[in-house]
Image (tube, rainbow, N blue to C red):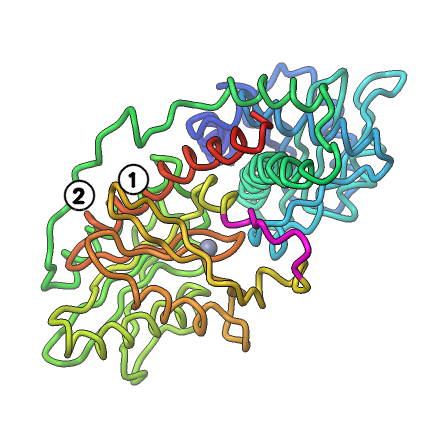
Amino acid sequence: MQALLRKYAVKLAATGLCAPGDALLAALDDELAWSHTGDVRQPLMQEVFAGLNISALLLARPSGVYQAVMAELARQALADGSASITPGDCETRTFLHDLPVVDGLGEDGLSAEGVIQALRQRKGCVVLHEGVAHVAAFGTVSPEQAFVTMSSMCFACFVAYFAEHLRRARLGTLTPTLTPERRKAFARITALLPPDRGETDGLPELASGPFETEDAARQAMIQAGRHTVEYGLVDSYFGNISYRLPIHGNDTILISQTGSSLDELGPCIDPCRLDGSSCSGLTASSEYSAHKAVYEAETAGAEMAGAGARAILHGHPRFSVILSLDCERLDCPRLGECHRACDTPRVVADEACGLSVPIVPGEVGTGPFGLCNTLPPALTATTGGKRGAIVYGHGLFTLGAVDFRDAFATLMDVEHFCRAEYFRRVAGLGAG
Ligand SMILES: [Zn+2]
């Protein structure tokens, strides 16, 4: 158990969410097992454990830009009396709801009681103690749940903070919404952003297709998935990936399983037959229906164009998600319904590098506003070497002609462009 707890502590640091050695995890084995010992937070963790019916608990201080955005949002949430952070992205809507904020400035520092109360309501909470944001998160069956909640909270706060700043800048054209304090915080937080990997790093070496065997395709998926997490284009556990493999006319889609970690796909890839004759439909990604519909639309289109896409890569790149939340229509009657019913054609476009990526609404699942209805027509309508579509407040889907090289490059290009475009818009509104 201790090895597993250490694994997640190391993984949180490796993905830049907290400093090495900071995350403290505990899990109930025969007795309480710890990721490390000799930590002053252990008595507090024990108290929280005793107050909840859980099997694993995580306490960590996010670092760098994640610490800065979380502390800033927590400070605002306590100041305005809401004591909760409400991000608008899909990952949070479906996975976390809002994030309770606990004022940790008790007489004896961090108070277990506040954390227990908050964790009775939600999977994780933010504790603001002496200006520093701490994350507390639990698992009912495994420490992985606590790890996923923590990384999801960091993602949610990052997106929420930058999206809110741009929203306020737009509203500011009507009423002043950016106080000098908020402007100062924005400059401080922006300076903490890690370098744009689209600028500093080249593309990773990825296997070249077309892949004719299931094994070759699986290896390529495992490799592309690992790099997608490693390049920060999705958090482990989220995102998905698939490849269409024609075997003697019986088209098969290989797709990552629901709840699998994109950087540890290994055996977590399911074969699903396109004709529906056999499919591990129960474990396949929750976005399987969307992938399937894209391949079907691509196959239909290929008869005219000559080649349909064989690969789909889906990540949650932060600035692509943030930019999808930005809208100039401040008086739109569909405000609040954007993620399912936006009917304004929107696009992220950069003529200079041939980028034109539509932003579409779409809920996870197969309902009338489901991704499987909104995404395929948007993706299939794209042309050229950089094919992708952003789903509002959710993430980016990209296509690969025969392998994941172009799908990965598009994922990076779009995120690189969206990051630069975000700061152009902020500066253009005088809020930089
Ligand atoms: Zn997703």
Say whether marks 2 and 1 touch (CB < 8 Å). Answer: yes
**What residue sits right under mark 1 in the picture?**
227
Q: Note whether 134 is above or below 49 in the view shown.
A: above
- Front-lying residue, 148 or 75: 75
Q: Disc 2 marks which amino acid? A: Leu
Mark 1 C-beta closer than 8 Å to ligand 1: no
Q: Note whether 400 is above or below 68 in the view shown.
A: below
Q: Note whether 62 is above or below 422 in the view shown.
A: above
User: Quadrant of residue 240 in the image?
Assistant: bottom left
Residues drawn in magenta: 324-332
Q: Mark 2 or mark 1, which has the lower sequence index?
A: 2
Say how many tags the image has.
2
Residue at the image point whose x is 41% and y is 54% from the top: 347
Q: Residues within 10 Å of mark 1 (few under 14, many from 20)?
A: many
User: Quadrant of residue 271 in the image?
Assistant: bottom left
x%, y% of residue 213? 11, 63
**What residue sits right under mark 2 in the picture?**
206
- Front-lying residue, 296 or 33: 296
* Mark 2 element type: loop
Q: CA distance from mark 2 to mark 1?
A: 9 Å
Residue at the image point whose x is 70% and y is 45% from the top: 86
Residue at the image point whose x is 65% and y is 59% from the top: 332
Mark 2 C-beta closer than 8 Å to ligand 1: no
Q: Which mark is residue 332?
A: none
Q: Residues within 10 Å of mark 2 (few under 14, many from 20)?
A: some
x%, y% of residue 17? 51, 28
